[in-house]
Amino acid sequence: MSASVSIIVALKWATEQLTSDSPRLDAELLLAHVLQQSRTWLITWSEKLLTKQQQQTFEGLIAQRRQGRPVAHLLGSAGFWSLELSVNEHTLIPRPETEILVETALAHIPPEANWVIADLGTGSGAIALALSSERPLCTVHAVERSTAALKIARQNASALGLNVQFHPGSWFEPLADMLFDLIVSNPPYIPEQDLHLNQGDVRFEPGTALSSGADGLDDIRHIIHTARQYLKPGGWLMLEHGYDQGEAVVQLLRAEGYQRVDTIPDLSGQPRVGLGRYR
């Protein structure tokens, strides 16, 4: 860009530079971040000139986005549910489809319930924190094996003033002798040879949080089998899964003795959340 460009010119330039699925949105989010303003402010003050430092910073962010760096990583945060969460390369970027899991859980938890809930593989803490924010009387435990991710999750809980108990470890390992009314998880479920792992934003996210075995179901199998030991009588297990894994997850739940097994679709109508009640 030439020197002393306006906001509207900078956004036009950036939109032309980017080849992502949403170039204009990406440009607006990044420029709003640089200016520490809202996207609405950018429109209102579209003729305002950028300073040299602002322009250089913006150009640097656009260059990184052109290389494929996720916008959430460049911003250092992502919106999920009603929360703004810090994220980095050690955590998955919370996605809209995971809100289906939160909605499903909340539909089963009475508003005044004091359930004990576990979130397995919490990452940035998105699911656990969303549930805690909506059901403050519940006790929420969140498990994460990545020390770096767990640090981010704890920071998010502190920033939001939410009381979630975090446990380092893999799946159920740190939850010995505990019983839960509800266990939720967004585990890795992409097949390890899936070509999508080499495309888009997921290239910059932790692989161990994305893929799980040849068919993507290794961790889901483990959770469905082991959760039976950690659920109270009548307790629920709810899992996010891939769009083409709904029938497989239903069969796994039924084979392990879960009742009232069902799948919940995402906004595109694809199966996204599998659930069942044990005993």
Image (cartoon, rainbow, N blue to C red):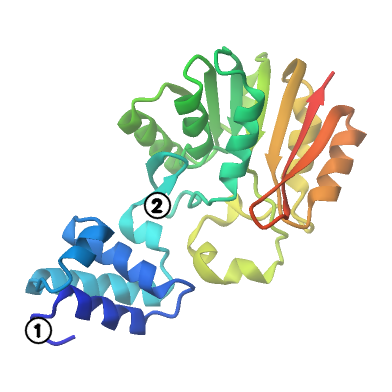
Which residue lies most toward the right here?
255
Residue ID for mark 1? 3
- Helix, strand or loop status at disc 1: loop
Residue ID for mark 2? 88
Q: Quick check: 61 left or right of 20?
A: left
> Percent from the top left, x then y, of residue 200?
52, 70
- At 61% across and 43% down in the image, what residue appears? 100
The residue under label 1 is which amino acid type? Answer: Ala
Q: Quick check: 119 left or right of 163?
A: right
- At 31% across and 77% down in the image, what residue appears? 63
Position of the C terminus by quadrant: top right
Residue 172 visible from this viewpoint: no
User: Callout 2: few (<14), some (14-19), or many (20+) C-alpha neighbours within 10 Å?
Assistant: many
Camera-nearest residue between 166 and 80: 80
Q: Which mark is residue 214?
A: none
> Percent from the top left, x then y, of residue 128?
52, 31
The image quadrant that residue 133 belongs to is: top left
Q: CA distance from mark 1 to mark 2?
A: 32 Å
Camera-nearest residue between 53 and 214: 53
- Helix, strand or loop status at disc 2: loop
Position of the N terminus by quadrant: bottom left
- At 60% across and 16% down in the image, what residue appears? 116
